[in-house]
Amino acid sequence: MKRRTTTRRSSLLVALVATGSLVLSACGGGGDGGSTDGEGGTAAAGGGDASEVQVMTWWAQGSEKAGLEALVEVFNEQHPDTEFVNAALAGGAGSQAKQKLQADLQAGNPPDSFQAHAGAELQDYIDAGQIEDVSALYDEFGLTDVFPDTLMERLTNDGKIYSIPSNIHRSNVVWVNPAVLEEVGIDPSTPPADLDAWMADMQKVADAGKTPVSLGMDWTQTQLLENVLLAELGAEGYNGLWNGDTDWAGGEVNSALTKFGKIVEWSNEDRDGLDWEPALQKVMAGDAAYNVMGDWAVAAYDAQEMTAPDDYAYWPVPGTDGVFNFLADSFTMPVGAAHPGGTKAWLDTISSAEGQLAFNKVKGSIPARTDIEASEFPAYQQSAMEDFSSDTIVSSLAHGAAAPVAVLTAVNQAVVKFSQGASDVDTLQSELVSATEPLAG
């Protein structure tokens, strides 16, 4: 997204992050289907019960449900002898699905596959011995030849891969109401050059009695925070937050947090009670000027038949142009799954060209595969595919790519405490230092 001022029609993905603690059992699970032989387990063997596959996601309503249905249609064509059992659970930014998953994993009764964010979010499952190494499937399905190196690097953990992605999303996008900006004398077709310039425009909106930025529940606030940090620190400094090269206690982080705090002050007071779409609705209705949200937001505009550039515009978060803040939904093969043959069939479909084409057309995301023609997709996905191939790639904190679940949970808690006025910038920084201490180990 090279400072484009229009967005395109596509569909919705609620790529959300659970806010509760995920305490994973060290038990590897039970059943007859799983294996932890270090060579791909049942994935390498390719055997096991394929009569059905039970898949747990949080794609239970709206356009994400439509995306799942498109994928299941391809699955039924490719694997007609395997019954798809939909174990989706809606609500609470995926928290209900993750709570149910936690209980099932601890009880040794896992689903045959479950949705998770690619990257560090999987670390707890890996450490607990709850998901298989599926590296052998990458060779069997030919994925190493069609997944880009930038993605493969983010999927690999100590030389092994534990999930297969169905898509790629971007989190550093600002959604804009042009009419609100024009009303206060701001040109919506010219994105601000950096974070400071953007905040100056926010002040103009606030002076006019409008809400500059709409926010929602905890993970949307963390998503804003990560992109403020990205804008202030740059890609290298931002990456350093996760590999230890950037000091969370340093002055640059403090400066970024101060700016984050000002933006939060400018946001809607009812933020903690809103999911992402009601927060975006404030921009759509002209009650707020900006919303920072992943690119699944375009479907909300599509649903109301709103089009760019008249009804809305989009930009990279000012200061992050040329950087793609990455996240991806992926699927696993749990240890002890009852139907490992069904799991393999599901992973085959979600990684296939046919599956990724059907799925991502509906969801607004882009395929993980590089052998699908961009012309097959609407214009927004075409632009995102171009950007992912050329931009600097960083990993989203709010969507599980940058840090394990325990770290993210602690960050979410510190951010909400701050947004509710229960801490100041220095306290927030201290709590973020504590939250990210596990990364140093």
Image (spheres, helix red, strand yellow):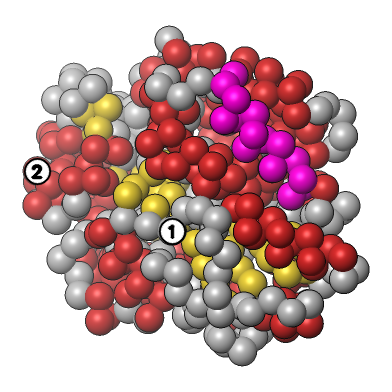
Residue placed under numbered mark 1 in the picture: 321
* Towards the viewer: 224 or 166: 224
Label 2 secondary element: helix
Q: Main secondary structure of the magenta part?
A: helix
* Towards the viewer: 169 or 66: 169
Name the kind of residue labelled 2 in the image.
Answer: Asp
Image spot of residue 415 (x, y percent): 71, 34
Quarter of the picture containing the C terminus is top left
On the image, which quarter does residue 188 sit in?
Answer: bottom right
- Decide if residue 125 is in sight here: no
Residue placed under numbered mark 2 in the picture: 139
Image spot of residue 20 (x, y percent): 67, 31
Name the kind of residue labelled 1 in the image.
Answer: Asp
Image spot of residue 10 (x, y percent): 47, 77
Judge whether residue 262 is colored magenta. yes
Q: What segment carries the magenta color?
A: 249-264
- Which residue lies at the image location 32% right of the left edge and 63% below the top edge? 387
Q: Is residue 109 above or below residue 347?
A: above
Label 1 secondary element: loop
User: Rounded to the nearest whole Å, what is the CA distance between mark 2 and mark 1?
Assistant: 35 Å
